[in-house]
Image: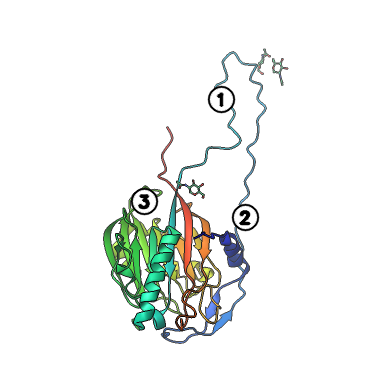
Amino acid sequence: MIRMWTGLWTLALQELFAHGQNELIESNCDVQGMLQLKLQPDIVKPETTTTEPAEASAANLSNSSQPPLVTLMPTQALPAPVVNITTFHWEPHWQCAETDSACIAAALSKFKELVSESGAQIVGALELKGASGALPGWSSSKEYEDAVSVMVAPGWQVLKEGGGNIRCDGQRGLAVMLVKPPFQVSNCDTLCVMAVHPGHSPIQSGESIVKSVCGDATTSCAIAVGDWNVDAAGVVGGSFNTWQRLVGGNPPSFVVPDSETCCYPSTCCKFDHVVTNIPGAEPLQVHVWPYQLLGQFGMDEEHMPVAVRFSAPAKTTLIG
Ligand SMILES: *[C@@H]1O[C@H](CO)[C@@H](O)[C@H](O)[C@H]1NC(C)=O
Ligand SMILES: *[C@@H]1O[C@H](CO)[C@@H](O)[C@H](O)[C@H]1NC(C)=O
Ligand SMILES: *[C@@H]1O[C@H](CO)[C@@H](O)[C@H](O)[C@H]1NC(C)=O
């Protein structure tokens, strides 16, 4: 099958800056389902960074008794070494993937197929029963509230695992693992990987679970995929401020995609994102698949599957 990766992330970033956060009207604990949305046009301005061309100094080197000690810098420095990581996550939703055995089997089969197609090393499943045992050779968390689990590819070592409820009514899940990838990523000895499913209002717990599993790896070595039930602006700030509430440490280096990924049949909401606070991490490619099992099952509130490939600095080495 041809992989149709698209450069959607630039579009997603533009949208993040062009639009504000989707505020949800809600008084109490939400139930599993969509709620009315109100658009608040609070504009977030992108930070502009200007790179000054290096000043070419016209030193007259011929007037010197010594051979020149300084050679002019080449106009382009060698690119810093990077590593690439790919994530995949999908939420087929509970009406199919937690209750109907035929639909669960079909969703798991599609899940395995898309994980393979994406080439992902980190995978999250939400409201998908049985996903934690579906990928042969992979390491997985347990399945937590609303069938949330996180998996890492063969070769990735799991040091610690945990998860639990991050909502007052016990319906929203978090799965988290402290892992050691088979290659060095930035200055991270370990990575904190998460599948997250906060509710339709700001989260009330979960940070203690993340901290107890990941410890200091939350500071600048965290990667989370999931259905955040808020757009990218709400992940990084606003009244939800989910990243700070759940993970803390460095603010996100990126939140992608920020496009409408849910939910069948009323696509309205930018809820599925991949987020990391690894400094210098940059999205390379974002792929959003269309809804999957339509025509075969009802697929109420199915989300679109999402894969993101991003680069992160390889281990930084000091010069001299
Ligand atoms: C550099 O210095 C030498 C010796 O002082 C002089 O002859 C020459 O014209 C200078 N060249 C420039 C570009 O200033
Ligand atoms: C080199 O520069 C110095 C300081 O500007 C000057 O005193 C000297 O005369 C110059 N030498 C030549 C060969 O131009
Ligand atoms: C990472 O991805 C970039 C962009 O596709 C590619 O040029 C580079 O070779 C990749 N690096 C590694 C280490 O795979």
Amino acid type shown at disc 3: Cys
Residue 33, percent from left and from top: 45, 84
Q: Secondary structure at mark 2?
A: loop
Kindly identify which residue carries mark 2: 48
Quadrant of picture, ligand 2: top right
Counting residues from the start of the chain, the first of labels 2 and 1 encountered is: 2
Instruction: Mark 3: give few (<14), some (14-19) or many (20+) Cα within 10 Å.
Output: some
In front: 190, or 181?
181
Counting residues from the start of the chain, the first of labels 1 and 3 encountered is: 1
Amino acid type shown at disc 2: Thr
Instruction: Mark 2: give few (<14), some (14-19) or many (20+) Cα within 10 Å.
Output: few
Q: Secondary structure at mark 1?
A: loop
* Residue at image coords 65%, 30%: 57
- Are the two marked residues, 1 and 3, in contact with CB atoms closer than 8 angstroms? no
In front: 247, or 99?
99
Distance, label 2 to label 3, CA atoms, is 28 Å
Q: Is 256 on the left or on the right of 89, as rendered?
A: right
Residue 279, percent from left and from top: 46, 53
Distance, label 1 to label 3, CA atoms, is 35 Å
* Residue at image coords 44%, 77%: 202
Kindly identify which residue carries mark 1: 70
Kindly identify which residue carries mark 3: 188
* Residue at image coords 47%, 70%: 241
Q: Is 151 on the left or on the right of 20, as rendered?
A: left
